[in-house]
Amino acid sequence: MLANGSLLIETYMSFKKGINDTSGKAKEIFTEFFQTEEEFAIFKNTEVNYAERFYNDIRCGILHQGETKNGWTITRKKEFPLFDKDLLKINAFKFDKSLKSVLKNYYQKLKNSNWDDEIWLNFRKKMLHIICNCQKFSVVILGWGSLIWNFDGLKIISDWQKEGPFLPIEFARISMDGKLTLVIKQNSKKVPVLWNLMEFDDLQQAREDLRIREKTPTIENIGFVNLKDDTSHSLNNEHIINDIKKWAKINEFDAVIWTDLPENFETKLNKPFSLQNIIDYFNSKKQSEIFEKIKEYILKTPKQIETTLRNDLENYINE
């Protein structure tokens, strides 16, 4: 019972915190669990770290050697409390009952929380990690603009997750239909982009799927890092490769892809990139359908993409 309970604690905390697994941090996980769950308040102690001792002498003892250690014992006698500190004795039935209560409370919190609350964000993140671990090769896609609200057939698995790498993003590209759009721009303010998991477990297929969605003629405009063979590609933005690699490694993803189109404001309009020149461009389109598309794009951009120019652009289009 305590072996199953220990495994369940780690699983529960992984969902609660939105982490892939507890490798290298299981002791901290158990300490946090016993310090924060009221059903197990008896394990709190300012002088003796019973949480850490439980981890070493119960969890590790049972899972690695099939026995408890250092004087800890387990009982099923009803008259014993959940935990006797003097005897270092745990009541298996009461431990199981308390753990069930923790899970029921977690279920109720999920049920009563909003979809975008932290508890659900972490739950979905953990589920995506589970899906990744079932894949032979996990491919993650990064997004910051219209990909977020207009998938247009892109084969992604879940809602977009908010904790992507920090990348230099700005409204610095004019699209084929005249919209001012977000693009990677060197030396711009770094903002946290979003990420999602692709349905593919093949890197080239995932890149091709994004190429089709972006309507770009060449797959060379789809950047990637592959941690499995330590390869990468960026036709226009090699300066972001290391940041993406570090993020992917921390999150244990095999590969990451993104739209790697260049900024083109200056070449398209033959004018320097500046706020005033952007506003002049907006003014030239104000009586056309293009301006409505520009306005829609800026207003739909995820809140976390707080670029240097975003606030000024929103103020202008809302006048």
Image (tube, rainbow, N blue to C red):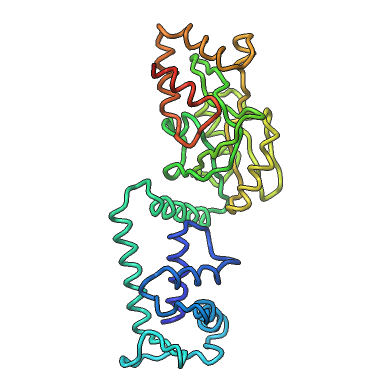
- The residue positioned farthest toward the front in the image shown: 46
Residue 202 location, x and y as percent?
A: 58, 44
In the picture, the quarter occupied by the C terminus is: top left
In the rendered structure, the answer to whether residue 148 lies left or right of residue 169 reads left
Residue at horizontal 54%, vertical 23%?
A: 171
Residue at horizontal 51%, vertical 68%?
A: 29
Residue at horizontal 46%, vertical 29%?
A: 146
Count of all numbered marks drawn on residues in the image = 0
In the picture, the quarter occupied by the N terminus is: bottom left
- Splitting the image into 4 quarters, where does residue 223 fall? top right
Front-most of 77 and 234? 77
Front-most of 136 and 258? 258
In the rendered structure, the answer to whether residue 129 lies left or right of residue 264 reads left
Residue 145 location, x and y as percent?
A: 49, 30
Front-most of 222 and 1? 1
Residue 43 location, x and y as percent?
A: 44, 79
Residue 318 location, x and y as percent?
A: 39, 19
Residue at horizontal 41%, vertical 28%?
A: 300
In the rendered structure, the answer to whether residue 96 lies left or right of residue 234 reads left
- Splitting the image into 4 quarters, where does residue 274 fall? top right
- Splitting the image into 4 quarters, where does residue 235 fall? top right
